[in-house]
């Protein structure tokens, strides 16, 4: 099953690097296809554009959100009013991604465990009633067993369904 990961970034190079590098390292053992997408909102922080280019060189799809706004302005004659640029970036990720499993990420997340992605994908393969599973950046399990039909605990991953 193909998984698409998307990171939204704006002037947070340190966090972007940490998230992207730990993510790539943590999913190396996954047998399926993986797509990495970074939506950057025209960051001006020194070093960001160079790092985005290294991601592109490593197979990532890197999209400049400002370029998309300007293209929309050209196509429809104005820049559409957007209340929340983060939401607009997520929509751009959803439109761009080609995976069967779509995983939007906060740019300040770190992935410290390996082997978790297969369990994550298995959740979608085995359960027809699961359409979303959230990543907990706090790395804490806060589950009330009365609220869920089943709690699945694997090697370092916990899912409530």
Image (cartoon, rainbow, N blue to C red):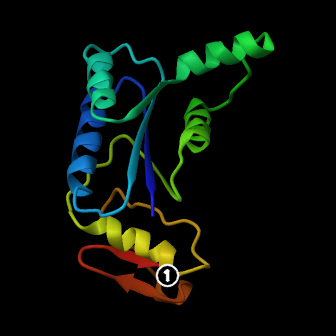
Rendering coords of residue 116 (x, y %): 29, 67
Q: Residue at x 24, y 78 (%)?
A: 155
Left or right: where 56 falls relative to 150: left
Rendering coords of residue 39 (x, y %): 47, 31
Q: Residue at x 28, y 49 (%)?
A: 23
Left or right: where 46 falls relative to 107: left
In which quadrant is the N terminus drawn?
bottom left
Rendering coords of residue 56 (x, y %): 34, 28
In the rendered view, would you say 152 is above or below 132? below
Asked whether 32 or 76 is in front, the reply is 32
> Does any portion of residue 90 appear in the rendered image?
yes
In the rendered view, would you say 31 is above or below 128? above
Give the number of callouts.
1
Q: Residue at x 30, y 64 (%)?
A: 31
* Residue identifier under label 1: 126
- Residue 157, picture quadrant: bottom left
Q: Residue at x 55, y 17 (%)?
A: 66
Asked whether 144 or 74 is in front, the reply is 74
- Residue 18, picture quadrant: top left
Rendering coords of residue 83 (x, y %): 68, 30
Left or right: where 81 falls relative to 110: right
Element marked by disc 1? helix
Q: Count neighbours of disc 1 (C-alpha within 10 A) and say few if under 14, some if 14 to 19, many if 20 or more.
A: few
In the rendered view, would you say 142 is above or below 108? below
> Does any portion of residue 141 appear in the rendered image?
no
């Amino acid at each position: 099953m193909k998984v698409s990961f998307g990171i939204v970034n704006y002037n947070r190079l340190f966090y972007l690097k940490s998230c992207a590098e730990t993510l790539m390292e943590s999913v190396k053992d996954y047998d399926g296809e993986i797509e990495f997408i970074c939506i950057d909102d025209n960051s001006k922080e020194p070093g960001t554009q160079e790092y985005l280019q290294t991601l592109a060189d490593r197979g990532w799809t890197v999209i400049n959100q400002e370029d998309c706004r300007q293209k929309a302005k050209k196509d429809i004659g104005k820049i559409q009013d957007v209340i929340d640029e983060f939401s607009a970036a997520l929509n751009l990720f959803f439109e761009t991604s080609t995976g069967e499993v779509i995983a939007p990420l906060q740019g300040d997340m770190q992935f410290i465990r390996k082997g978790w992605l297969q369990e994550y994908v298995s959740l979608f393969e085995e359960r027809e009633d699961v359409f979303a599973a959230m990543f907990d950046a706090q790395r804490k399990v806060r589950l009330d067993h009365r609220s869920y039909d089943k709690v699945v605990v694997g090697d370092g991953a916990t899912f409530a369904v």
